[in-house]
């Protein structure tokens, strides 16, 4: 041991700044020691020992492993003032989108301060003027003057000169502001699929045909879209929207003769059930309405009923009863099914409630008598399966990407099945005239359903119900079926004619040798300056290609996907083989089959502009709706939203100016 090594030396703080040691050397708790953070070992506080350790195999190995991981400065490099500003702007835009999707605008006041504090904690050298600065006023401005206009600009670019259809409806929000909602359906070339998108909310005071047409026309001029490219509109059947004498449809048809009208089948089926239910005794609707109201505002009644239900069903909670509604499409079927499933429990509950003294004793006695009447049980047993079938058809037409051929088949098969329950087989036809009494089956041959027939047998053997009562119930149920068939044929006949033309483009039809002729196609949907001879030639060549091997079975089964693939098909010289025919087919598939899209918009309006946010103005409301529906369409959330730098930078600069 050398002489100088006999003496202890203390740690020199200057070593922490020495380039040889700065990356790994730390001061140990012992002043006579040094600490290597890479090797996690203590060393003598001698410079010679530190240099020797730096070159050791163990230290070099640990240093090489650490060097693989980038430093925080490499992950988040020191930005220039311009890059720093752009980064902060991007964060502010993403925060604004997050706020629009998940909370009220006022939340940003506190959220921005929390994030700002964390940024400054992470980098204490950050200048205050470069930090995050966004509160509800700026957030609102970003939503209404930057993000929403950017999304609308992209939407207008996508639509361009493509033919489209409009889905229109009117509604009133919580602040009594009336709106005309516009949704658009078209083939999006950028996304290569048929899309149904929110286009805008127009404030209206009066909803006459002239007022609505003027508001619609002005809005299309404002956003620079050609209203004459609209080839069809879908409405809920309101007279001001689609009346045959004077309506929004007739005014638009004056400008474009071949404009098509499609009344929402979901609304129509809902009305079929509502009108057919008028043939049944009024006490059926009374039971649906008052049973729900009985439990609506009483926790005590719910608790008593829950005890009875658990006793009869060995535990488990009952499903919530459904309120009967004149606007919710599926409410009636669900309300009937829930009450029928809980019939015995409800019957016992009202038996008990009728014997108690309270202010609603009269209602309890009325419901007790109705639940103890076997005729009412028969009505509910009859209604439950048939309303379930109506709901299934309704749900089919609410789908965004339903194939027109499939839904037409389902609708026709459902109508024929309904007719077979009341008509002689020889008379069953979609074109049948139901005014002739001779075509109807006698009462004892009408198909009321298996459960209904089985219940009658049980009631006759176990109760004192009379045959005349059963006969009256059957007559009422037969009247329900007859009224339902009449309403269904009348309300869907016009839509069926349109769908029959559209179904010719289904791969299941157009690729067969016995397909319809070219003249039967909806050729009035062809765009301007399209050569009819070219389209006809492409129609002839269509059946000569083996598309199953080209695209696969899954593509062949989906009409809109098949035609979008066909539009890109090229020959050896890179010419598009079926461009004009595919454009015609995709225009036909752009026909709206229901008002489900616009009803979803109104649901979002109700959820966004509620009682607590009733002062929200229309620009902000429309911006929030557009952002939410745009993200949903792309299948992403606010965390994956990426601002379009060029467009939004220009809009942001305009806002700041």
Image (cartoon, rainbow, N blue to C red):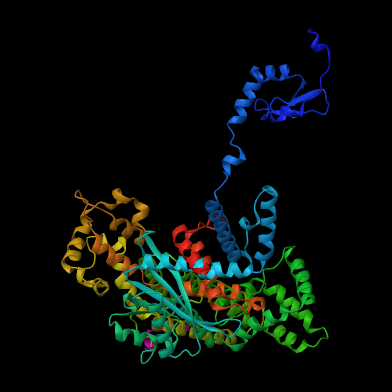
Residue drawn at x 83%, y 17% as measured from the top left: 8
The residue nearer to you, when weighing 105 against 35, is: 35
Q: Is residue 438 magenta?
A: yes
- Residue visible at 49% across and 82% down in the picture: 271
Quadrant containing the N terminus is top right
Q: Residue 254, image x and y in percent?
A: 30, 86
Query: Residue 467: x, y in percent?
Result: 58, 85
Which residues are drawn in magenta?
435-443
* Residue at the far top in the pictured view: 1
In the image, residue 99 above or below residue 281: above
Magenta span includes 241: no
Residue 120 higher or lower than 279, as above or below: above
Based on the displayed image, in which of its 4 quarters is residue 315 positioned?
Answer: bottom right
Expressed as whole percent of the image width and height from the top left, the position of residue 634 reads: 47, 59
x then y, percent, for residue 110: 69, 63
In the picture as drawn, the residue positioned furthest to the bottom comes out as 245
Where on the picture, by quarter, is residue 286? bottom right
92 to 407, vertically: above or below: above
* Residue toward you, 121 or 139: 121
Residue 429 visible, this angle = no
């Amino acid at each position: 041991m050398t002489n100088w090594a006999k003496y202890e030396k203390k740690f020199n703080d200057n070593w922490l700044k020495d380039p040889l040691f700065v990356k790994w050397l730390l001061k140990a708790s012992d002043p006579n020691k040094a600490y290597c953070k890479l090797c996690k070992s203590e060393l003598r506080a001698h410079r010679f020992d530190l240099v020797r350790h730096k070159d050791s195999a163990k230290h070099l190995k640990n240093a090489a492993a650490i060097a693989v991981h980038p430093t925080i400065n490499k992950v988040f490099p020191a930005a220039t003032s311009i890059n720093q500003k752009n980064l902060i702007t991007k964060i502010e835009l993403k925060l604004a989108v997050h706020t629009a999707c998940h909370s009220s605008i006022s939340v940003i006041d506190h959220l921005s301060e929390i994030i700002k504090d964390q940024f400054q904690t992470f980098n204490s050298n950050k200048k205050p003027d470069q930090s995050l600065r966004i509160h509800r006023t700026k957030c609102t401005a970003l939503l209404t003057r930057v993000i929403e206009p950017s999304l609308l600009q992209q939407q207008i670019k996508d639509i361009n000169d493509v033919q489209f259809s409009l889905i229109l409806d009117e509604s009133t929000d919580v602040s009594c502001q009336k709106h005309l909602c516009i949704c658009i359906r078209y083939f999006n070339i950028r996304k290569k699929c048929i899309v149904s998108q929110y286009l805008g909310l127009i404030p209206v005071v009066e909803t006459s045909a002239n007022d609505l047409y003027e508001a619609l026309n002005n809005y299309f001029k404002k956003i620079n879209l050609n209203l004459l490219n609209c080839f069809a509109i879908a409405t809920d059947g309101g007279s001001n929207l689609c009346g045959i004498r004077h309506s929004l449809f007739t005014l638009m048809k004056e400008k474009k003769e071949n404009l098509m009208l499609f009344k929402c089948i979901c609304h129509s089926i809902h009305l079929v059930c509502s009108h057919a239910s008028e043939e049944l005794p009024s006490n059926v609707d009374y039971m649906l309405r008052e049973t729900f109201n009985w439990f609506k505002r009483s926790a005590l009644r719910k608790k008593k009923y829950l005890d009875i239900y658990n006793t009869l069903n060995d535990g488990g909670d009952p499903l919530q009863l459904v309120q009967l509604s004149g606007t919710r499409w599926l409410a009636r079927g669900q309300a009937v099914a829930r009450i029928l499933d809980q019939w015995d429990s409800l019957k016992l509950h009202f038996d008990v409630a009728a014997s108690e003294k309270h202010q609603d004793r009269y209602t309890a006695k009325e419901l007790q008598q109705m639940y103890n009447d076997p005729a009412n049980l028969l009505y509910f047993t009859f209604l439950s399966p048939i309303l379930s079938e109506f709901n299934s058809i309704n749900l089919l037409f609410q789908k965004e990407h339903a194939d027109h051929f499939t839904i037409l088949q389902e609708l026709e098969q459902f109508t024929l099945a309904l007719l077979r329950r009341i008509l002689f087989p020889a008379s069953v036809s979609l074109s049948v005239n139901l005014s002739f009494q001779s075509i109807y089956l006698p009462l004892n041959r009408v198909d009321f359903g298996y459960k209904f027939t089985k219940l009658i047998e049980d009631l006759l053997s176990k109760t004192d119900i009379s045959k005349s009562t059963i006969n009256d119930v059957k007559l009422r149920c037969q009247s329900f079926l007859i009224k339902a068939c009449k309403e269904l044929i009348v309300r869907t006949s016009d839509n069926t004619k349109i769908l029959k033309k559209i179904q010719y483009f289904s791969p299941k039809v157009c690729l067969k040798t016995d397909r319809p002729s070219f003249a039967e196609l909806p050729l009035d949907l062809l765009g301007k300056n399209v050569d009819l001879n070219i389209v006809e030639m492409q129609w002839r060549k269509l059946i000569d290609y083996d598309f199953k091997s080209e695209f696969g079975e899954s593509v062949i089964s989906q009409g809109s996907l098949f035609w979008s693939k066909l539009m890109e098909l090229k020959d050896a010289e890179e010419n598009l083989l079926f461009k004009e025919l595919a454009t015609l087919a995709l225009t036909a598939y752009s026909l709206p089959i229901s008002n489900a899209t616009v009803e979803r918009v109104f649901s979002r309006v109700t959820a966004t502009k509620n009682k607590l946010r009733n002062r929200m103005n229309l620009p902000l409301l429309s911006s929030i709706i557009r952002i939410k529906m745009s993200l949903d369409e792309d299948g992403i959330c606010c965390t994956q939203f990426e601002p379009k730098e060029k467009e939004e930078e220009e809009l942001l600069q305009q806002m700041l100016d």
